Image (tube, rainbow, N blue to C red):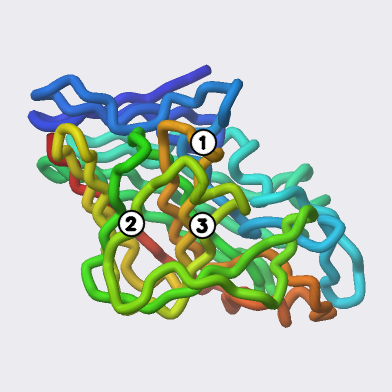
């Protein structure tokens, strides 16, 4: 496994070429590792990039101009080897471009450029999607970083929120019923049962940031998700991590939508256009 490293006075990070996935975010002062280390007996992932879909498609298939394609859950970027493009004093840059294998699943020409930048005690991860095709390109994009935590830790939105979660069935498709999560309040407490029905799938929030606070040490991760229209919060039940997942896209529902362009949360890029999204996390402790 090829891992690229970057550090400043406050933080050190590692990013592997496979999936351009974070492998470490460590405090230089305390030595604390903020990022889940990917125990395969619980969850092997650490911070996968979700592209060109988020979640699962019905039967793992979609229609594009009447042609059926198959694509795995969360897309293929997380299983792909990215090209290492550049390293500067404060950044690492990786790129995934279309190839013969991706075109079997997703018949577009594209670049997905991911830049990791250290700014004092913060990490910013920018994703740039470029449509190099001659046609409109449809895609979803999501982040999925997992942070070490304990049962009883708190996730606090920056504003009071009234939110319900969507749920998914055994086939990972969204169902119509929703369930309340917050009622004019800010805090979600991580309990051993909170993810028994899989992820919390949230939308319609006012906040642009959520803070994970450790109940024992007071250590925090201030996570800015910005304008992402969906926020997934997930872990394996009782596991010592939590994933904070900004999404531009969402799992299929049990309702049929026909063509890929009609999928809920789908994004469109015209030929030559680009889409950019960055999340930022400030690490204290």
Residue beneath the point at 54% across and 60% down: 141
Q: Are marks 1 and 2 in contact (CB under 8 Å)?
A: no
Spatial distance from mark 3 to mark 2, Cα to Cα?
Answer: 10 Å
Nearest the viewer among 146 and 154 is 154
Report the residue marked by disc 1: 83
**Secondary structure under the numbered disc 2 in the rendered image:** strand
Q: Dot 2, how many residues are within 10 Å of its Cα: few (below 14), some (14-19), or many (20+)?
A: some
Left or right: residue 273 versus residue 256 is left
Q: From the viewer's perspective, is residue 1 above or below residue 260?
A: above
Nearer to us of marks 3 and 1 is 3
N-terminal-most mark, 3 or 1? 1
Residue 77 in picture, x, y percent from top left: 61, 45
N-terminal-most mark, 3 or 2? 3
Q: Dot 1, how many residues are within 10 Å of its Cα: few (below 14), some (14-19), or many (20+)?
A: some
User: Which of the 4 image quadrants contains residue 158?
Assistant: bottom left
Report the residue marked by disc 2: 279
N-terminal-most mark, 1 or 2? 1
Residue beneath the point at 60% across and 54% down: 51
Residue 114 in picture, x, y percent from top left: 42, 48
Nearest the viewer among 135 and 256 is 256
Residue 93 in picture, x, y percent from top left: 37, 41
Residue beneath the point at 65% across and 59% down: 53
User: Which of the 4 image quadrants contains residue 185?
Assistant: bottom left
**Secondary structure under the numbered disc 1 in the rendered image:** strand
Q: Dot 3, how many residues are within 10 Å of its Cα: few (below 14), some (14-19), or many (20+)?
A: many
**Secondary structure under the numbered disc 3 in the rendered image:** strand
Spatial distance from mark 3 to mark 1, Cα to Cα?
Answer: 19 Å
Residue 107 is marked as none
Residue 216 in picture, x, y percent from top left: 19, 33
Report the residue marked by disc 3: 142
Nearest the viewer among 16 and 135 is 16
């Amino acid at each position: 496994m090829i891992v690229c490293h970057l550090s400043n006075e406050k933080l050190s990070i590692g990013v592997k070429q496979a999936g351009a996935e974070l492998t470490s975010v460590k405090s230089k002062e305390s030595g604390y590792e903020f990022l889940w280390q990917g125990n395969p007996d619980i969850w092997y992932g650490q911070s996968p990039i979700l592209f060109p879909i988020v979640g699962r498609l019905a039967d793992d298939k979609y229609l594009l101009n009447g042609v059926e394609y198959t694509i795995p859950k969360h897309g293929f970027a997380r299983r792909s080897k990215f090209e290492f493009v550049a390293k500067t004093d404060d950044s690492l840059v990786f790129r995934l471009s279309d190839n013969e294998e991706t075109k079997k699943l997703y018949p577009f020409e594209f670049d997905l450029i991911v830049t990791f930048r250290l700014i004092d005690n913060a990490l910013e991860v920018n994703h740039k999607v470029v449509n190099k095709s001659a046609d409109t390109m449809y895609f979803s994009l999501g982040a999925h970083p997992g942070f070490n935590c304990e049962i009883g830790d708190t996730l606090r939105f920056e504003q009071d929120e009234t939110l319900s979660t969507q749920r998914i069935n055994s086939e990972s498709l969204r169902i119509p019923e929703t369930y309340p999560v917050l009622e004019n309040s800010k805090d979600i407490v991580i309990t051993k049962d909170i993810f028994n029905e899989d992820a919390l799938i949230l939308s319609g929030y006012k906040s642009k940031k959520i803070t994970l606070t450790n109940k024992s040490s007071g250590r925090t991760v201030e996570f800015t998700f910005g304008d992402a229209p969906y926020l997934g919060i997930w872990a394996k039940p009782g596991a010592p991590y939590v994933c904070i997942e900004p999404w531009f896209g969402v799992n299929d529902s049990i309702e049929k939508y026909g063509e890929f362009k009609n999928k809920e949360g789908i994004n469109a890029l015209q030929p030559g256009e680009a889409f950019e999204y960055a999340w930022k996390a400030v690490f204290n402790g």
